[in-house]
Image (cartoon, grey):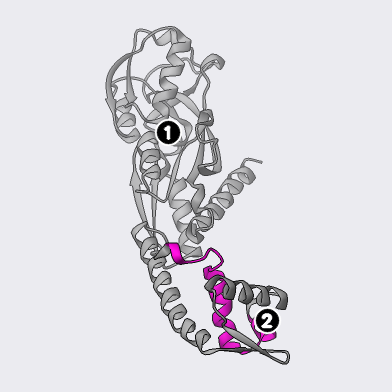
Amino acid sequence: MSDNINHEITFRKLSVFMMFMNKGNIARTAEALELSSVSVHRALHTLEEGIDCPLFIHKGRNLVPLPAAWTLLEYCRDVTALMGKGIEEARLVAGVGCGRLRIGTLYSLTLETIPRLIMGMKLRRPTLELDLTMGSNQMLLNMLEDDALDAILIATNNGELSDSSFDVIPLFYDDIFLAAPAGEALDLSRPADLRDYADRDFVSLAEGFATYAGFQEAFQVAGFEPRVVTRVNDIFSMVSLVQAGMGLALIPGRMKKVYENNIQLVSLAEAYQMRQQISIVYSHRRERDHDLLALAAEGRMYARSLTDSAV
């Protein structure tokens, strides 16, 4: 049956038609829809051509509906109502516009960034529920691609998200440091050369985490394979192991505020220096989603506050 529907018949034209049937003339219809009278007349004329039967007759300057138009109007109401319900149901199944936003984040961002963004979002959209999922960079990106999450906060280095599939809202850059137990005697007068620690044990995040990739790259530059005693699946466990003396680690500077009394962070020598760019990422096809636009706006405000405080 769908093959019998002419391409000239569109929901936009049906909306114009229903408004005309309600208002009774072209001028009032144009005003209600914020269109020109010419656009309204063209929509009605091409709709009539698409249906291939007369819907109106001219009486002087007036366009008067025929019985066929009133019959069509009944079905238009049913069709548009049904399509509206279908769109609403589809959005609910996709988790869009249902009063809930599913956000994924790196563990380390729950210390400051995520609380700040959530507080801002609650002010912007008090009724919006926020579901939080924590994981590795790769896990969160996979969940976003599978539509299991609406937005994620991850490291977006190396241009891997440079195509048109995603919208990326940069928040801040973070440097990577060498982490050691607070009581260990380290030479703090100069940046750390990883080659000086070739005989030390290290703890590391598992593969898929942003800091893991930086860890691998740094030791490739250093020219040796580090002795990794264990790999963990969250940065808090890794810091706890460093604190307990299990080994050294490479961690982002954002952890410093919370753990500055428990571990010491040493800047890396220039050859090993790395920066992570932390960003909000969501699918480009949802660029008009009001909840995501609110999150993006809050992210930009947060980024601006960090820039202002650094000046």
Residue 31: numbered disc? 2
| Of the pair 306 and 282, the residue shown nearer to us | 282
Amino acid type, residue under disc 2 in the picture: Glu
Type of secondary structure dominating the magenta stretch: helix
Which residue occupies 38% across, 64% down?
98
Residue 22 within the segment the image draws in magenta: yes
User: What residue span does the magenta drawing correspond to?
Assistant: 3-32
Count neighbours of disc 2 (C-alpha within 10 A) and say few if under 14, some if 14 to 19, many if 20 or more: few
Amino acid type, residue under disc 1 in the picture: Glu
Which residue position holds label 1? 260
| Residue 32 sits above or below residue 282 on the image | below
Count neighbours of disc 1 (C-alpha within 10 A) and say few if under 14, some if 14 to 19, many if 20 or more: few
Q: Residue 8, how many percent across, how many down? A: 56, 66
Which residue occupies 36% across, 29% down?
208
Q: Earlier in the sequence, mark 1 or mark 2?
A: 2
| Residue 48 sits above or below residue 185 on the image | below
Measured in 3D between alpha carbons, the distance from the residue under mark 1 to the one under mark 2, in whole angstroms, is 64 Å
The image shows a total of numbered marks equal to: 2
Residue 10 within the segment the image draws in magenta: yes
Residue 27 placement: quadrant: bottom right
Q: Residue 130, how many percent across, how many down? A: 38, 57
Residue 248: numbered disc? none
Q: Nearer the viewer, mark 1 or mark 2?
A: 2
Q: Residue 216, how many percent across, how many down? A: 41, 18
Q: In terms of secondary structure, where does tag 1 sit?
A: loop
Q: Quadrant of the C terminus?
A: top right
| Residue 130 sits above or below residue 41 on the image | above
Q: Residue 5, how many percent across, how many down? A: 47, 66
| Of the pair 276 and 143, the residue shown nearer to us | 143
| Of the pair 134 and 15, the residue shown nearer to us | 15
Q: In terms of secondary structure, where does tag 2 sit?
A: helix
Q: Quadrant of the N terminus?
A: bottom left
